[in-house]
Image (spheres, helix red, strand yellow):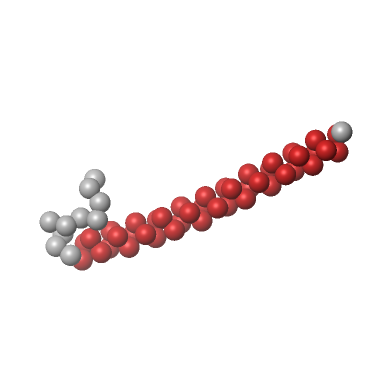
Amino acid sequence: MLLLLALLLVLIVAGFGFAVHLLWILALVLLAIWLIGFALGRGESAGRHRFYRW
């Protein structure tokens, strides 16, 4: 029984680490998309067109 609990704990920790890794990759991809959009928004008429509305 103790061995099964230890195995379950290892699986939970490994799954959490994998999820955090995927979130980091997703964050980097979104950052790259935001930077590209920001650069494209500056290239066109900066006063009228914006990629985002902040």
What percent of the width, then of the height, locates residue 20? Answer: 57, 48
36 left or right of 54 in image: right
Q: Nearer the viewer, residue 11 or 21?
A: 11
Residue in the picture at 76% in, 39% down: 8
22 left or right of 50 in image: right
* Total residue callouts: 0
4 left or right of 30 in image: right
Residue in the picture at 86% in, 34% down: 2
Rendered view: 36 above or below 5: below
Residue in the picture at 87% in, 33% down: 1
Residue furthest to the bottom: 43
41 left or right of 31 in image: left
Residue in the picture at 25% in, 51% down: 52
* Quadrant housing residue 36: bottom left
What percent of the width, then of the height, locates residue 28? Answer: 46, 56
Quadrant holding the C terminus: top left
